[in-house]
């Protein structure tokens, strides 16, 4: 008898959650359509342990949750005004725990002296652990963590070994996926420019 009571109680909780799911979906539908359920401003409410109702399920890949700004995907190189910020200093390759970054510094064809730019830059994202050390330690803010998460591929060397052309992204891409960080960078840049102007 005691076990049956607990079974009924647990089934009641399951049934209540099932019904609340549809009630909650209708509530969000009337607030802004089906897309309102997954907007960045409504997600904290729907994912809250105290405010959420029902079963929170995303029908992936038809429905996708927006990635948080601080999400660390795979690294990319910033291209600003047609030129890479990277100076091929090699800091990112030295601090990378799985050693998945390889850089070849460019050299002047006439003098043979090394230039402050990479001739080749490779990142093997099949072994990258997305720790973000490369972006954190880069002294020139030349490498950032992207938002790519769907990287399944059949050919490892062709699809998962990214070269210089596949790694370079415009500064506008960084501003789009990291708006807060980008705004802070611009403020620092303006403060430095103002300090130089005062001197």
Image (cartoon, helix red, strand yellow):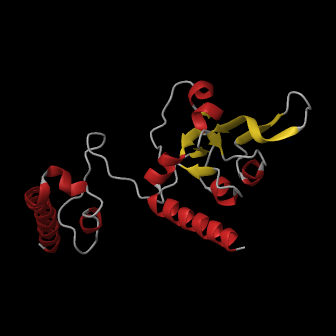
Total marks drawn?
0
Looking at the rendering, in which quadrant would you find the N terminus? bottom left
Which quadrant holds residue 14?
bottom left
The residue lying toward the viewer, choosing from 150 and 56, is 150
Looking at the rendering, in which quadrant would you find the C terminus? bottom right
Residue drawn at x 76%, y 52% as measured from the top left: 91
Q: Position of residue 97 (x, y in %)?
A: 71, 52
The residue lying toward the viewer, choosing from 50 and 17, is 50
Residue drawn at x 65%, y 37% as measured from the top left: 124
From this viewpoint, is residue 169 visible?
yes
Q: Is residue 42 above or below residue 113?
A: below
Q: Position of residue 118 (x, y in %)?
A: 74, 38
Which quadrant holds residue 121?
top right
The residue lying toward the viewer, choosing from 53 and 9, is 53
Is 114 on the left or on the right of 91, as rendered?
Answer: right
Residue drawn at x 66%, y 39% as measured from the top left: 123
Q: Which residue, as the protein is rendered here, is positioned at the far front?
A: 198
From this viewpoint, is residue 162 visible?
no
Residue drawn at x 12%, y 62% as measured from the top left: 24
Q: Position of residue 83 (x, y in %)?
A: 64, 40
Is 135 on the left or on the right of 13, as rendered?
Answer: right
Is 137 on the left or on the right of 55, as rendered?
Answer: right
The residue lying toward the viewer, choosing from 25 and 18, is 25
Q: Is residue 151 above or below residue 89?
A: above
Q: Is residue 87 above or below residue 153?
A: below
Q: Position of residue 150 (x, y in %)?
A: 44, 39
């Amino acid at each position: 008898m005691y076990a049956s009571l607990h079974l009924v109680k647990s089934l009641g909780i399951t049934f209540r959650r099932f019904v609340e799911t549809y009630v909650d979906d209708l509530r969000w539908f009337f607030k802004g359509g089906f897309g309102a359920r997954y907007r960045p401003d409504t997600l904290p409410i729907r994912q809250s342990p105290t405010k959420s109702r029902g079963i929170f399920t995303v029908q992936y890949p038809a429905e996708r949750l927006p990635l948080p700004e601080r999400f660390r995907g795979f690294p990319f190189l910033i291209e600003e005004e047609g030129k890479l910020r990277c100076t091929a200093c090699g800091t990112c390759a030295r601090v990378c725990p799985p050693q998945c970054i390889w850089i070849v510094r460019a050299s002047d064809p006439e003098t043979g002296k090394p230039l402050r730019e990479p001739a080749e830059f490779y990142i093997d994202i099949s072994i990258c652990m997305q720790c973000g050390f490369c972006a954190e330690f880069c002294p020139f803010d030349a490498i950032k963590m992207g938002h790519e998460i769907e990287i399944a591929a059949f050919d490892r060397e062709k699809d998962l070994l990214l070269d210089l052309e596949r790694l370079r992204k415009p500064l506008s891409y960084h501003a789009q996926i990291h708006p807060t960080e980008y705004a802070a960078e611009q403020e620092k840049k303006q403060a430095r420019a103002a300090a130089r102007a005062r001197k």
